[in-house]
Image (cartoon, coloured by chain):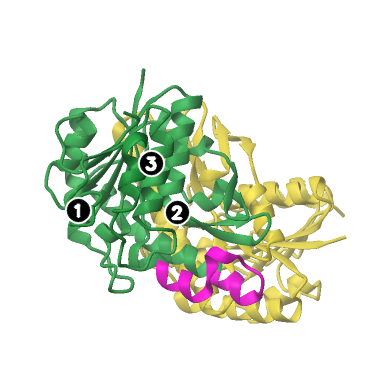
Chain colours: A yellow, B green
Amino acid sequence: MLELVLIKLGGSLITDKNQPYTARLETMQKLVEEISLLSKQNPSLKLIFGNGAGSFGHQSAHKYNTINGIFCDADKLGFCLVHQDVLDLNILLAKCFLQAGLPVVSLPPLTMAVTQDKKLLKADFSIIENSLQAGLIPLVFGDVVLDKIIGGTILSTDTLLAELAKYFHIQRNYQVKLINVGNYPGVYDQNMQVIPHITPANYSQIKAVIGKSDSIDVTGGMTQKVEEFLAISGLGIDCWIIDGNISGNLIKAVLGQPTLGTLIRAF
Amino acid sequence: MLELVLIKLGGSLITDKNQPYTARLETMQKLVEEISLLSKQNPSLKLIFGNGAGSFGHQSAHKYNTINGIFCDADKLGFCLVHQDVLDLNILLAKCFLQAGLPVVSLPPLTMAVTQDKKLLKADFSIIENSLQAGLIPLVFGDVVLDKIIGGTILSTDTLLAELAKYFHIQRNYQVKLINVGNYPGVYDQNMQVIPHITPANYSQIKAVIGKSDSIDVTGGMTQKVEEFLAISGLGIDCWIIDGNISGNLIKAVLGQPTLGTLIRAF
């Protein structure tokens, strides 16, 4: 069975969420170096990356309330501005990958997904699949998408990666792992301690104590993330929430070695 | 019948083809101002833009010989570098549109087309169609695409716009016009005089006297452009080759007023 690892580089990790349009280039470069090493040591490993928008996406998205639809000319311009903003960050990241010699292609979700009242209606992942087969590394991101009911909305990186994980696991029979690399050590309980292991069985207890994200994020906080990951963990897809600031931690999670963070799995 | 105008902004117009990675921002801004005026005066007019890569695309494309396929790791990286280079220029242009208040969305051809030994095999234009219907202005560009035989190649803006023109004319019943806005007054004869009118009937005579482009262009010069336009003119799609440096000329071509340049049509 082919192995596929989907890696989300969180907006809070690769940008300064409190400073509009401010990337953390050094953090990006450090992560890309690790990934480059991993990739060279495991040439058959298939990887897909997604990045959050952090302080690039959320400014215009808030101003134009893009998540709730596009109805007037200002909304339409706003939709395009949000797309451009998230693309700006994505391109900074893509260039880090390219400078490290990794064949990364930036693929905007706008071109592959359509929603219906904010829920994913249709997705065509053929360009991602064809890119993987051609030996390239697809890079997606949280993006605006067209919506059949409200004209347009925002599709988060988390939702997109969860859909991709399901697609490659169910329809393409890959062994899939999803790793969320953030600016936090994992899922916190009420005492700011990392919860090491979340399962459907213990989630009802855990839900009440999950700490809330304190930054602007139009696409939902930690609870939504955990619930999206729980839903796919039931299919046999292990999901990690780890700290991208801990050197070597991402490699460990990819390789299945003991990792600091929260593991979300079916049992 | 709905009217659709496809406008190519040539690489030789919006970049300095002799200076690598050098955009002509003032030229872009001037053109975008004209288009903004046109768009406000004709709000029902549907527009699709495409831009050539000029001195942004052709450097890496030559270095890695991307048009002839991707076979080794260096080719794969080259493919991604070309994509990033053409995207860089496209984004500069997209930002000019956005600054002028036009809701332009950049849509990479890589995500919508697949070739077979350099010939277009499959194209899915639904994102372009859906964007138009949502009141947005699609912006495409000459891009790398995946190829079923040689792994990857380059699809020129001219070929893509010609395909889009055919698609919207034949399958969607639009009245379509295609305008190529370049850094030259039209198609030159051997005496550097503009040929005002090319038809299938006079082309055999004209072919021998068409001047050759003297800049780097991996995707073909004027002869290929004229032949692609002639092929679609037979369907009832008028094609203009005009000078983007002449103020007001683009608006005239769009509105069907007397225009300086070369008109390619069926009769």
Structural distance between the alpha carbons of marks 2 and 1: 23 Å
User: Where, quadrant-wise, is the N terminus of chain A in this rendering?
Assistant: bottom right
Q: Amino acid at mark 3?
A: Phe
Q: Mark 1 sits on what residue?
A: B29
Q: What SS does tag 2 mark?
A: loop
Q: Amino acid at mark 2?
A: Ser
Per the rendered image, the range of residues in magenta is: B58-78
Q: Quadrant of residue A119?
A: top right
| Letter of the chain that mark 3 sits on in the rendering | B
- Residue A13 seen in render: no
Residue at coordinates 20% horizontally, 32% vertically from top-left?
A: B40
- Residue B229's mark? 3
State the residue in front, A251 or A188: A251
Image coordinates for residue B116, horizontal then vertical, percent:
64, 51
Tell me if B56 is positioned left or right of A47 in this view. Answer: left
Q: Nearer the viewer, mark 1 or mark 3?
A: 3
Image coordinates for residue A248, horizontal then vertical, percent:
68, 81
| Letter of the chain that mark 2 sits on in the rendering | B
